[in-house]
Image (cartoon, grey):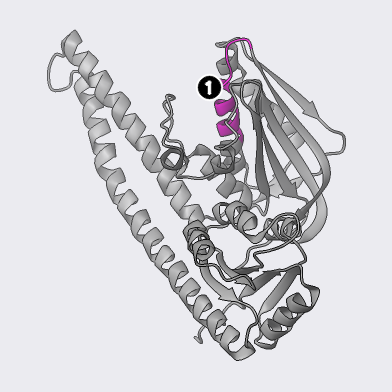
Amino acid sequence: MGEQPERTPRLLVVDDDDGFRELLKTILQNEGYKVDTAPNGEEGIRIARNRSYDLIFLDLKMPGMDGMQVLKILKPESPTTDFIIVTAYADVQIAVELIRLGAKEYITKPIEPAEFIQHVRTALRAHAAELRVGEIQSEFSSRLLHDLRGPVVIVNSSIDLLGKGTPGPVTPEQHQILDMMRAQMNKMDALLTDMIDLTLFESGKVHLERLPLNLDIFVPSICDRISQQAKAKNISIQTQIGDTIPTLELDPEKMQQVFHNLLDNGIKYTPDGGSITVSVSTGRHVFGGKDCESVEIAVSDTGVGIPKEELPLVFDKYKNILTGKTSSQKTTGLGLAICRSIVEAHQGKMTAESTVGQGTTIRIFLPTEDV
């Protein structure tokens, strides 16, 4: 069997100089790369959010949002994309700051095409190597997590046997210790399950069992099932279902995991007497650069909200580390990262809006066709 053809790198050039932008596009296309362009930072962000890129070239000085601001926004959102600054303004301190923010290189104008292409080739080779290292690390992590699962199952079974008095009578004090051990082992089991799920999604090894799913029936049924948990805190769950919601090809089990997680979060972080509203509607959205019809699901709560500085990290698996916080709730902190992975595996997107003290809205956008 022959080797699989290599994927053609996709690049984005963001520069307000029309002539220079087209020059870079021509040079890069002549090398066989797929190239998109944007005339300003705002448009660059919009395009980058709708398509994955291997390299993004940023002009530093642009009207409106400059290259540094674009880098600050896009790098956390696109950690596997490499950024190269191409600018006429040579400044060592600025260059150091840009590298600190995640830029791979700082190239000054004017450029010599042959030298520029050499920079690009080197950057793409390094980019491909980093992605491969990430794949190897993911495979190792997956194996390690599965190996850890075995001892956890054995310990849990042993705790259950001890609790039932199989080896001999158990005192009330011993029952308390066993209950504490069981709770901690259940927490470890949940963490391993979440880590395994996340690792599988990140490695692209998850198989989706796509079946026709009527979200206008599916979503209210899940809300009904979780309503008892909400009633314990006197929280109401309301549904708002639009007309003519199309049937989508989705994995019911995976989507149930998403909605259970979102509703569970809403209940946990909403004070007693609050409310959660789940709406399903239709509209249009851009997926992978393609504008198409979509279904939007919004889960809104009247909870404590998320601070503005933490909102961009809400779907990040490292958010607790990056924010320096640990949840007071008994959760792994990986729920939203897994939800995003599931939605993205369905070619969809997730967004978050929040105001401290007023609540949070998580939106899911799912295309009605392949993109």
For the C terminus, the quadrant is bottom right
Give the residue furthest to the right.
Answer: 243
* Residue shown at 46% from the left, 54% from the top: 200
- Predominant SS along the magenta part: helix
* Above or below for 139 versus 244: below
Q: Is residue 218 above or below residue 87?
A: above
Q: Give amino acid for label 1.
A: Lys
| Residue range (magenta) | 259-273
Instruction: Rate crowding at label 1 as few (under 14), some (14 to 19) or many (20 or more) other CA atoms within 10 Å.
Output: some
103 vs 12, left or right, is left
Asked whether residue 264 is drawn in magenta, I would say yes
Q: Which residue is mark 1?
A: 268
Q: Quadrant of residue 17?
A: bottom right
Q: Position of residue 24 (x, y in %)?
A: 70, 80
The picture places residue 80, in percent across and down from the top left corner, at 53, 62
Query: Which of the 4 image quadrants contains residue 90?
Result: bottom right
Q: Is residue 319 magenta?
A: no
The residue at 43%/64% (across/down) is 135
In the image: residue 144, left or right of residue 326: left
Q: Determine the residue located farthest toward the bottom in the rendered image.
A: 114
Give how far across and how far down residue 353 sits, in percent: 67, 35
Give the camera-side residue of 317 and 120.
Answer: 120
User: Which of the 4 image quarters holds residue 23?
Assistant: bottom right
- The image position of residue 306, as x and y in percent, is 58, 30
Residue 164 visible within the image: no
Label 1 SS = helix
- Tell me the residue at 81%/37% (across/down): 281
At a point 71% along the width and 61% down the height, the residue shown is 44
